[in-house]
Amino acid sequence: MSAPISATLIPGDGIGPEIVDATLAAFDALGVSFNWDIQQAGLAGVKAAGDPLPPAVLDSIRRTRLALKGPLETPSGGGYRSSNVRLREEFKLYANVRPAKTMIPGGRFDNIDLMVYRENLEGLYMGYEHYIPMDGDPEAIAIATGVNTRQGSHRLLQYAFEHAIANGRKKIAVVHKANIMKALTGIFLDEARKMYKEKYEGKIEMQEVIIDACCMKLVINPWQFDCLVTTNLFGDILSDLVAGLIGGLGMAPGANIGQDAAIFEAVHGSAPDIAGKGIANPVALMLAAAMMLDHLKMHDKATRLRTSILDTFNVDNVRTGDLGGKANCKEFTAALVSRIRNG
């Protein structure tokens, strides 16, 4: 067996520790050895160190340049800022990659195989917000400023084109709102057009689609799309929409890719309402783990993990409750581990 791979492990909040344990069991069955540096963040970080993103977490990822992360709780409205956003900013994780592929046939939508590439650092998620007082109300007017740069657009678009072509994809749709936000999303569309003409024309087909029309088309005929590349806010919305086509966020993994680090995670939240009940679906994080294995060039292990999940669902008919089954998290994990080991 090869030497263990150093990586940071963030169990996270809510159901995080449960689905992380399940994913580690899958890694063990695959014979993949990691030297995990376990760190706490989110609400667990606040409880352990008084900080939702303690310095020890950042130091660990700087050292390992690789992390697997459970969901982190972020309060709505007030409270501390999202640790997920802070991690992306700290390590300049500019590309958010979210595949959506049907794993259980027979649903409302079948044979879905989509890839969403989302710009991760710019747009309206930069947090440039403030209030303007008026008539005695200190928060009478709320203002947010979105920022997209040509450099940031170029970086994400280049990654998307290269990744799509390397993975045999045929089409990539550039999703925008340049008809209304002519500067903010126009710069993204303009950079896509230039890049496609200079480098990628003839290698992959490029489409252009306005965000609202894209949402409509995705729920009427998602098969007309192959890959979608877009700005931060639109990418967040679209990635959840396409997750709905394949059974929900419990089936949705995500990768955050930067020049010097990569963080892999389940797209869903911490689900505190079911934490500790043992009924969580660990598949989203397991699929993120498969993306992590692909990132490490362990393509055979990644394929084996995905195939084993498919067989556990569709041959063994073992599924968690959110997918119409009766298995709890541990029962599903045991069935998957058996599949990995025995084929």
Image (cartoon, rainbow, N blue to C red):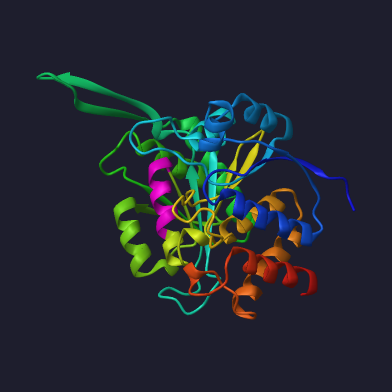
- From this viewpoint, which residue is outermost toward the front? 277
**In the image, 326: left or right of 342?**
left
| 230 or 235, nearer to the observer | 235
Dominant SS of magenta comes to helix
The location of residue 311, given as percent across then percent down, is: 65, 75
Q: Residue at x 52, y 62 (%)?
A: 251
Q: Is residue 240 magenta?
A: yes
Q: Nearer the viewer, residue 106 or 285?
A: 285
Residue 168 appears in view: yes
User: Residue shown at 79%/54% (left/top)?
Assistant: 32
Residue 197 in sight from this viewpoint: no
Which residue appears farthest toward the left when viewing the image?
Answer: 135
The answer to which image quadrant residue 54 occupies is top right
Report the number of discs.
0
Report the side of 314 relative to 244 (left or right): right
Q: Find out whether residue 233 is within the magenta segment.
A: yes
Work out whether residue 242 or residue 305 is closer to the camera in this orientation and state it: 305
- Magenta span: 231-241
Write the residue at 50% across / 73% down.
111
- Percent x, y of residue 33: 81, 50
**Residue 327 at what x, y percent from top left?**
57, 71
Residue 59 vs 36, above or below: the answer is above
Above/below status of 162 relative to 246: above
The C terminus: image quadrant: bottom right
Left or right of residue 297: residue 102:
left
The image shows residue 16, relative to residue 102, as above or below, that is above
Residue 211's x, y, as percent?
A: 33, 51
Query: Residue at left 9%, top 19%?
Result: 135
